[in-house]
Amino acid sequence: MATNDYPRMWRDLGINLEAHDGLLQVLSQGYTDVFLSQDNRPKGMDYLDFVISEIHGLRIQELLEAKSQGRKIIGTFCLYVPEEIILAADAVCVGLCAGADIGSQQAEQVLPRNTCALIKSFVGFKLANLCPYLEACDFVIGETTCDGKTKAYEIFNEYKETFVLEVPHMKSAEDRALWRSEIRRLVAKVEEATGKEIDAERLKKGIRVINGKREALQRLNSLRRAHPAPISGRDALLINQVQFYDNPLRFTEKIQAVCDELEERVEKRIGVAPPDAPRILVSGCPMAAPNWKLPFLVEKNGAVIVGEESCVGERGTRNLVGGGGETVAELLDAIADRYLQIDCAVFTPNQERIDHVLEMARSYKADGVIQYLIQFCTPYGMEAHKVERALKDKGVPSLRIETDYSTEDAAQIETRVQAFLEMIS
Ligand code: BJ8
């Protein structure tokens, strides 16, 4: 394929070109408004700007090249799917985004209307033939997290092969045993699909690469604890979003370079916002690309988001695979244990998450917490009360924002955010 012959590449993937053009236009306008309008961005964000400008171009081309060399492309929708295992089989892992409502009309033909926007988004992307990442995938891995996703994968499987991992909802010894056996079932599936045997050396390499990526993101997060904050919440969120589909080694190198720059800013006390800008922690549902509505509204009104207690944020990056295992069994158990530490609201009880929100509010010196809830998300919606109460007990003001991916409620959200910022300033 000739370089940059993207329309042909998309057509060959079965993309609906007309609708896709519309999507790219909305994306490009949104990116200009939300990101390029910012002052004082770190120079290293040029790389992220480039990645977004090529979001459905160069990276898709890379995936198709990998495919032509016999490598499999495997899509995921959740933090519980270990990238290390996919890498160990020399396959490419793509975290599929689900942050736009462009295909939700089609999704509502097969899903109840009161389904969360994230689920509608990934089903809609498929039904509307809009996502070249999804079309490039050989198969996707789903998980039994919330009920909505669990049941949606049954429908999704009719359109794209979906292998579903059973995620337990408690963390007892029996649950751990179940989860460890599920990880082995995943290994068997990935080995069968790729024709590659996952041995200890390959697993160690996969672990090294993904630990390296998470260490870079941990470094970014620790720099955001500085006062004044050296990078905007929007740019940090973008970095966290891009990590799901970029080449992990290249991404790690680029983010370490952004961190070098931020370190210099911190030393010189250069902030991205004035030192008295309210510092906000966002907590709750994941913000998949291109879902940038809330961070934009918060920062446009003079605050700076310093951290995300989210799967597209610290929930996904704070734990590394450890254990120093040598055999395949030891390494797989270490991977399983690392993933079972994730404190998604689908678990019960889930005190770890409440503790983590409090710890982040303290260590990031947040003046307030905004709970971000996707409408119809029962797990995070249910947990919101406990989070709010725990924050109140510690004297940390909080605000709940429940929304979807449309822009219809933007003005209303902005008014509530403004009132909250005024109260905490
Ligand atoms: S580990 S948060 S990525 S499940 S917003 S679909 S929970 S109804 S996305 Fe998630 Fe994995 Fe948990 Fe993270 Fe359901 Fe809620 Fe929708 Fe959600």
Image (cartoon, helix red, strand yellow):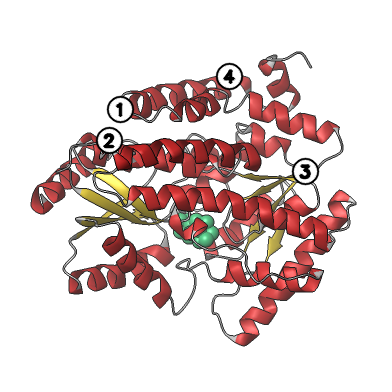
What amino acid is found at the position of numbered circle 3 in the picture?
Asp
Asked if 62 appears above or below 88 in the picture, the reply is above
Q: Establish whether ligand 1 lies closer than 8 Å to the Cβ of label 1.
A: no
Q: CA distance from mark 3 to mark 4?
A: 24 Å
Circles 2 and 4: CB atoms closer than 8 Å: no
Badge 1 marks a residue whose secondary structure is loop
Q: CA distance from mark 2 to mark 1?
A: 6 Å
Q: Where does label 1 land, which residue?
A: 40
Nearer to us: label 1 or label 4: 1
Nearer to us: label 2 or label 4: 2
Q: CA distance from mark 1 to mark 4?
A: 36 Å
Q: Where does label 4 land, which residue?
A: 18
Expressed as whole percent of the image width and height from the top left, the position of residue 50 reads 52, 24
What amino acid is found at the position of numbered circle 1 in the picture?
Asn
Of 104 and 321, which appears nearest the observer? Answer: 321
What amino acid is found at the position of numbered circle 4 in the picture?
Glu
